[in-house]
Each structure stands twice: as structure tokens, then as C-alpha cells.
Amino acid sequence: MRLRLGRPDLAAYADRFDVPAATAASRPAVTFLGVSTLLVDDGTDALLTDGFFTRPSLGTVALGRLAPDPARIGACLTRAGATRLAAVLPVHSHFDHVLDSAVVAERTGAVLVGGESTANVGRGHGLPPERIVVATPGEPLRFGGFTVTLVASEHCPPDRYPGTIDAPVVPPARAGAYRCGEAWSTFVAHADGRSLLIQGSAGFRPGALAGRRAEVVYLGVGQLGVQSEEYIRSYWAETVGTVGARRAVLVHWDDFFRPLDRPLRALPYAGDDLDVTMRVLGALAERDGVELHLPQVWRREDPWR
């Protein structure tokens, strides 16, 4: 098979970057911060998935050792207004999700929530035990006006760093030290009745979400474009279709080797194909009457409007 060069042109999807902007009355609101990092806040309490801001270069990931960049983390938290958080919730434990999570939790007063793999990232950073929560799958956790439920899921194939993290990870460490660990479908319900599902990786467990509902899905699409069309259809059905969402917002499509202070661009064709993803999901969304969007980075948005 001939390798396709270049990357998708985001300008082709300009009309999809149209999630309604948050207003003063938006409670909660969601801010997209690259990959699967999402800030969900209601003006009083705030949650953050992942908190990945260092975004090391491809060369560093391939050949070097990874460590959180305090300056980048601080700048991103300040720009996003995420100075105080209740919880940091990595969707799984690969570096592009969990690398900065313990630092973010420490700086914002949050607890770090996930499986034992994520806990070992927190322990390697030196977070005290009371700031680490090992979640029980399917058991709700309360954070102010939010109720969070983590449901066991899978990573999109292929998983380049499979397995669990069985000992504390002390950075700097190789990318391979950040094995996938426990992958989650993250349900967030707010006291005002609004609900969303954050599916940070384009993987699923058949039937795992049966009986659960969410108005909005933030749908991870990293590596989805290199899957078969049958897989893409199954993924949509098992996530957006199962929970009955009326709106799907696509995440984890951006080139995460590029710093967040530069304009986002799509992952290259060598690793993914956003064009395929948009074509197939666009048709499925139209068929099912679901609004399909791409989020704007740094912008507080109200996907329930």
C-alpha cells in the first residue's frame, strides 16, 4: 500500500467548528484544550479530563525521555482559567493523556482519579495518597455539582503501549512507560440535569454502555480513520447510538506533538485519516439526526444549547 503524505486540511471542515459558544448563563460549559483534555465547569466546581499540556515533540517521544513541562502547564492552566479543580480524570494512561495529570492535580488542588495505572503516575510524582482516587468501575463519584461515573472501556486498536502500569512512574521516563492501563468511558452528570459522555479513545466494549444515557458525547477519533468502515460504524453505534445523544463533538484529532500556543492541525495521514472519519461519521450523524461538530480550542462552549 502506498503511504499517503501530508495531513487533512481543517479548512475543509470549517462549518463543523460550530459548537454554540457558552454564555454567562451556561452552567456547565466545556472548553476543549487539545487531544482529549476537556475542562467542564459550572462556575463553582470544575473537572478536567487528562490535562495534557506539555505536548513533547515527536523526536522526544521516539528517542528521548518524557517529563512534564511546568512552564507550559502553568501557561495553559492560566489561559484556560483552570486554577482550581475538583478532579483530574485521565481517560487512560498513555503519555498523551496522563503525562501532566499529577502536576495539574497538585497545582489546582484536585484529586487524581482513575485506575491503578493512573494512580501509579500520581505516586511517581509524589502525590499523597489522599489526593489519589482509584475508581471502582460503574460506581458514581461526587464532585460538587457533578457526578462522575467511569465505565470500563478499551483503547482503539492498535494499542502501541498495551498493558498496565504496575509501579510508580518517575519522570523523565520513556513513552513506553506510560502503558494504556485502564481505559474509561467517562460519564459526567450535572445537578441541573445536563449529561455528557467523554469517550477519549476510539475504542469500545460491546454492550458496556447499555442502559446509560447522555445528551452530548465528546467522541475521541484518534486512529479511527485508519479502521475499517465496519469498525467505525460499530464504534458510533456503541457510543453515540447507545446513549441516545443528540450531539457529538469530535476530539483527539489534533497533532499532539505541536504546542498548544500554535494553531491546531490534524494528525498526518501516516497515523490517521480525519477525512475518512468525517465522511463516515458525517453520514451516520445525518442518518441518525445527530449534530456533528468539531470544537474550537480555548473557547468556552455550551454543547447543550
Image (tube, rainbow, N blue to C red):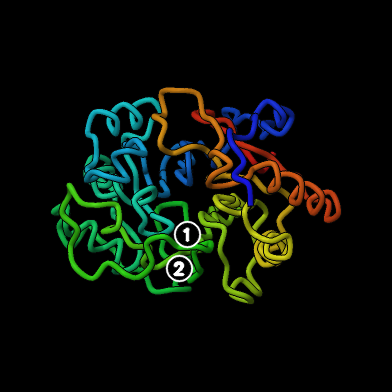
Give the secondary structure at mark 2.
loop
Q: Position of residue 134 (x, y in %)?
A: 31, 68
Report whether residue 262 is seen.
yes
| Residue 259: mark | none
Left or right: residue 241 compared with residue 287: left
Give how far apart the Cα atoms at labels 2 and 1 are. Answer: 6 Å
- Which one is nearer the viewer's eye here, 58 or 262? 58
Q: Residue at label 2?
A: 140
Give the secondary structure at mark 1.
strand
Q: Position of residue 161 (x, y in %)?
A: 37, 62
Dot 2: within a 10 Å radius of its alpha carbon, few (fewer than 14), some, or many (20 or more) residues? some
Q: Residue at label 1?
A: 147
Q: Residue furthest top?
A: 262
Q: Position of residue 73 (x, y in %)?
A: 29, 34
The number of discs equals 2
- Which one is nearer the viewer's eye here, 94 or 3? 3
Pointer 2 with pointer 1, Cβ within 8 A: yes
In percent of the image, x 18 and y 67: which residue is there?
Answer: 167
Left or right: residue 293 compared with residue 52: right
Mark 1: amino acid: Thr
